[in-house]
Image (spheres, rainbow, N blue to C red):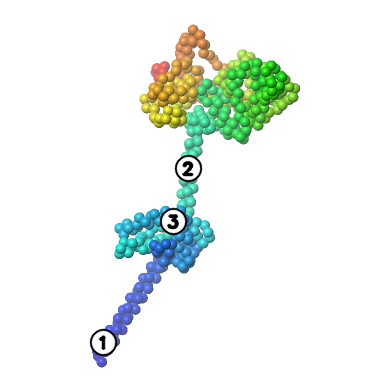
Amino acid sequence: MYAAELNKDSESGETMRLHRENVELRQRLNLVTSLLDNLPGMAYRCLNDENYTFEYASKGARDLFGFSAEQIVNAYAFRQLVPEEDQLKNYEVLQQLTPENDRFVLVYRMRSAQGEYRWIHERGKGLFSPEGVLVAMDGLLTDITDQKNEEIALRQENTRLRFSVDERYKLGKIIGKSQPILKVYKRIVQATGTKAPVIIHGESGTGKELAARTIHDLSDRKDKPYITVNCGAIPESLMESEFFGHVRGAFTGANTDREGHLMAANKGTLFLDEIGEMPLTLQVKLLRVLDGGGFSPVGSSKVLHSDFRLVSATNRDLNQMVCNGAMREDFYYRINTVPILMPPLRDRLDDLPILVDHFMQLYAEETGEKTQIPPHVIQKFESHDWPGNVRELINVIRRYLTLKEVSFTPFNTPAPAQEYPGAKADISIVHSDLAMPVVDDLAQFEKNMILKALNLHQWHMGNTAKALGISRRTLQRRVNKYKIK
């Protein structure tokens, strides 16, 4: 009997021990479950089957997706909630898991109960069978939608800013980022917002035609005609017919009616290049058109009207032409409403690297050979005055691509560009036997002027350059050229 009682007590003790262990196990499970349910996301176990079925999901599923944990386990699987393109990326990562490399991190989208996609960050661990086969994944899903949206917005903003920076180096087909060319960009943008006539000043080869085309392309007339007329290439006897058109029989050879440039430019832009070559007789008639009086084709009494935007260009001093009687004063003021000065290349040498790179890429296609200009050649470029401006640069680059040599065509250096076009020129280049003495006098005059300005501004290079209306680099090159000390 004593033995039976001992056996009974032993069984009772074992039962109590098992009970305590079960209680402790439940407590630990409850603790783990509570911890999992209170994680900032959804803890899960997912089977590595065809649909990636959820075997377990914590209560964080409700906050994460709007689904209950029971719905996630019983009704939905990864394949039903994750977009197909994201599934493919996830599959590639999971395929790389091994028993030795069983950790993974994924970022993808999952559909919520409201039908919207949330960005999910998943950190997990692969579970493998003894044979090394992936059977399931344990992990934690957290919502990073706000963070991801900010990241996307930042990336878009960076792209926009990068695009803006790139565009600052280019407007239409004009390329550059120097201060002089940025002033041109600003004035062109201002001009596109008006219908007022524009006059583009600048030396030959500075890009006046590009500026005119850019004004048209940025305006609300960009889809309308753009008519270019070189006033210096039309014989004076044909000027009226070219501009206003003519009717059949108006003169010998007028076998049909012909529309002139003014009507061809209706609703669009009329670009008059070398407007300083226009004769006085035509200036009077064109002024009448600009003032709204209309015009008549040669041989006709019918008055026509054309709605065109006038853009002109010249490399001549129109103010001096007015003084000399070669241009009507009223016509000059009518076309000179919005002046734009295209700076010479020697005053925007900061743009040389961009221009060289652009034209090297552009013309390398002609030779079928991609190459780079060596540094010592670039140094030659930077020490050259570029009297032919960008047109000369293009010629030198194409010559280099073809012959692999650098040579410059000798020119007399043009007078410095004026800040405001139309100011009276002090000296003009004389094509005669006296040309060389005149050039020497100009050089001495320029040297004295620079020395005087330097002394006036206590040899402060920046202030001196600003006072002279040139860049600091140009001033330094002039100082070196004339050996001013």
What's the residue type where badge 3 is placed? Answer: Gln
Q: Nearer the viewer, mark 3 or mark 2?
A: 3
| Residue 56 in the image, given as x and y percentages of width and height | 42, 66
Q: Going by the picture, which residue comes out furthest to the front?
A: 255
Image check: 229 left or right of 58? right
User: Mark 3 to mark 2: distance in Å?
Assistant: 28 Å
Q: Which mark is residue 87?
A: 3
Question: Which residue is nearer to you in this view: 270 or 155?
Answer: 270
**Quadrant location of the N terminus in the rendered image:** bottom left
Q: Which residue is mark 1?
A: 6
Q: Earlier in the sequence, mark 1 or mark 2?
A: 1
- On-image quarter of the C terminus: top left
On the image, the x and y values in percent for residue 232 come to 59, 18
**Sequence order check, earlier mark of 1 and 3:** 1
Looking at the rendered structure, which numbered label has been put on residue 159?
2
Amino acid type at mark 2: Thr
Q: Position of residue 416 (x, y in %)?
A: 50, 19
Q: Are marks 1 and 2 in contact (CB under 8 Å)?
A: no
Image quarter of residue 200: top right
Secondary element under disc 3, as helix, strand or loop, is helix
Which tag, 3 or 2, sits closer to the chain's start? 3
